[in-house]
């Protein structure tokens, strides 16, 4: 009886390790691959249903977007109202290199605004902090998102040791050391200066116990005058990148009713993908005149750390891959839902909507959480070229508004894919395309994509790339 009681806590921690090892073994045998040349019925913006003649189904998302767009058009700017420039950067691991390239090209063009509000989650939180501190840190932004390797962010040890000691597969100690060396006192001084000027930096984490997002005003914390202000800023930035289960949560002590309470914070990508908040200087709606567009003249710029839709696979995934694939698809859907939420805010407030995501034809590598300088440099170049070539690099419609994005009902099993360039009648069954055509600008002939490699694999019982890599964008 005594032995059973002694072994129970050990078993409670060892059993998850054994389960993960079994899962990893199954994943290691996986042959799931991304299809680089998918069949036309999966990528065409138009697919006609033989059982649904034109007019059978009316669009929903497209009609809503049209109405909301019309409501925003020609919104008059209220007298004496400040125009805001807001930047929201989603998470995405090494896919954040796309955002870094786009933002630095924006600076090089000489027209990147000084953002009044900057927000970010996960790797987007680090991008947001560097952009908030000022354009003089553009070289730092380029270095952070073109040269780092996985070992510069995460450290992995034998799985059982980590699960017994921290209930996680690795640690973010290398990331903490990197931030300690990079975000020095001068960086914090620039953050304080931006906050003093009325600008705001908000980053998101998730409270691991409540499983709800927590939004931090990082500029206010840096300007608090607390002797540990810098350490607190670093704690929050590390927490934004601590994926639950892959790295231990960051313990943050807060005071509640005079008593110290320890909270545990992790990456919030599972609950929000992108968001915005405002400081006290932002315009507010007028209750006496609710029709007034209180943010008319302001601009929202959203940069996604990934594509709008998940890549197409070559074949049905196995059992473990199917679970991971569904989780990943849920995160992509969460990003699109968050984009719609912010698009609606723009429509009712009069703020202009601008969205940039990685073009669907771009090669992004196997997963976002494996940091490969070659992949990062390629994605950085994609973002840089999209902004540097001139023209309008932004999409101005929400997901589902462009041809081929809304999922119409299927009335049968026989379909026709029209020739390329055909327009979609409203009765057509449409599937998510690999790129909303209105987003992409004319581009030079792309380089040949690297050879297709397995999406997931197991190396030396390093379970995170095989299991948790599927959980982020």
Image (cartoon, helix red, strand yellow):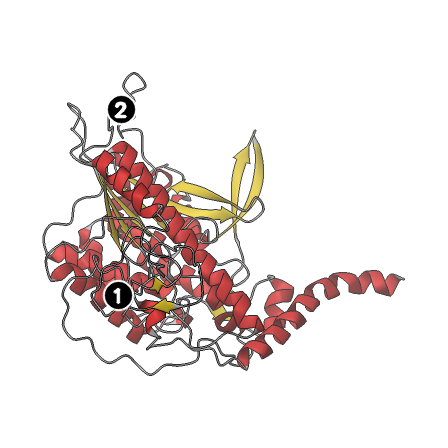
Q: Nearer the viewer, residue 243 or 59?
A: 59
- The residue under label 1 is 143
Between disc 1 and disc 2, the foreground one is 2
Pick the quarter of the image with the N terminus. bottom right
Viewer-side residue, 287 vs 370: 287
Q: Is residue 153 above or below residue 317?
A: above
Residue 33 relative to residue 183: left or right: right
Residue that numbered label 2 is attached to: 291
Task: Evaluate if marks 1 and 2 touch, with contact meaning CB atoms under 8 Å apart.
Answer: no
Q: How many marks?
A: 2
Given the current orientation, which residue lies at the most extreme top position? 288
Residue 185 visible in image? no
Label 1 CA crowd tier, 10 Å (few <14, some 14–19, many 20+): some
Residue shown at the point (55%, 45%) measured from the top left: 263
- Residue 133 picture location, percent across and down: 25, 48
The Cα atoms of the two marked residues, 1 and 2, are separated by 46 Å
User: Of label 1 and label 2, which has the lower sequence position?
Assistant: 1
Q: Where is residue 39, by image quadrant?
A: bottom left
Q: Position of residue 131 (x, y in %)?
A: 25, 51
Give the residue displayed 29% in from the left and 26% down from the top: 284
Where 91 sits versus 317, above or below? Answer: above
Q: Which residue: 58% across, 72% down?
A: 319
């Amino acid at each position: 009886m005594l032995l059973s009681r002694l072994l129970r806590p050990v078993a409670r921690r060892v059993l998850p390790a054994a389960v993960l090892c079994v899962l990893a073994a199954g994943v290691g045998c996986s042959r799931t691959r991304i299809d680089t040349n998918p069949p036309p019925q999966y990528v065409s913006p138009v697919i006609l249903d033989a059982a649904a003649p034109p007019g059978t189904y009316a669009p929903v998302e497209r009609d809503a977007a049209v109405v909301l767009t019309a409501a925003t058009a020609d919104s008059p700017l209220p007298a004496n109202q400040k125009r805001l420039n807001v930047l929201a950067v989603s998470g995405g691991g090494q896919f954040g290199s796309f955002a870094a390239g786009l933002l630095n090209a924006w600076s090089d063009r000489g027209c990147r605004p000084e953002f009044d509000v900057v927000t970010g989650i996960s790797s987007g939180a680090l991008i947001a902090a560097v952009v908030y501190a000022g354009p003089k840190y553009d070289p730092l932004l380029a270095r952070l998102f073109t040269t780092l390797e996985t070992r510069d962010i995460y450290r992995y040890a034998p799985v059982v040791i980590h699960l017994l000691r921290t209930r996680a597969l690795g640690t973010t100690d290398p990331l903490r050391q990197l931030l300690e060396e990079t975000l020095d006192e001068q960086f914090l001084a620039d953050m304080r200066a931006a906050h003093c000027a009325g600008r705001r930096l908000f980053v998101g984490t998730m409270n691991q116990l409540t499983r709800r997002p927590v939004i931090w005003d990082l500029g206010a914390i840096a300007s608090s005058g607390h002797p540990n202000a810098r350490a607190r800023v670093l704690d929050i930035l590390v927490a934004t990148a601590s994926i639950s289960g892959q790295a231990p949560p960051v313990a943050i002590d807060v005071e509640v009713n005079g008593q110290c309470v320890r909270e545990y914070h992790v990456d919030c990508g599972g609950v929000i993908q992108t968001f915005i908040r405002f400081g006290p200087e932002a315009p507010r709606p007028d209750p006496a005149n609710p029709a007034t567009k209180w943010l008319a003249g302001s601009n929202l710029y959203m940069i996604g750390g990934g594509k709008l839709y998940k890549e197409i696979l070559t074949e049905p995934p196995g059992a473990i891959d199917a679970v991971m694939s569904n989780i990943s698809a849920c995160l992509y859907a969460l990003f699109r839902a968050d984009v719609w939420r912010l698009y609606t805010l723009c429509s009712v407030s009069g703020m202009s909507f601008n969205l940039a995501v990685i073009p669907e034809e771009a090669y992004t590598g196997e997963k976002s959480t494996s940091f490969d300088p070659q992949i990062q440099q390629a994605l950085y170049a994609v973002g840089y070229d999209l902004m540097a070539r001139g023209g309008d690099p932004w999409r101005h419609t929400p997901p589902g508004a462009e041809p081929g994005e809304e999922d119409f009902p299927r009335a049968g099993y026989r379909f026709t894919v029209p020739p390329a360039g055909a327009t979609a009648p409203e009765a057509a069954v449409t599937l998510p395309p690999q790129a909303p055509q209105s987003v992409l600008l004319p581009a030079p002939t792309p380089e040949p994509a690297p050879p297709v490699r397995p999406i997931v694999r197991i190396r030396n019982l390093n379970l995170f790339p095989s299991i948790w890599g599927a959980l982020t964008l």
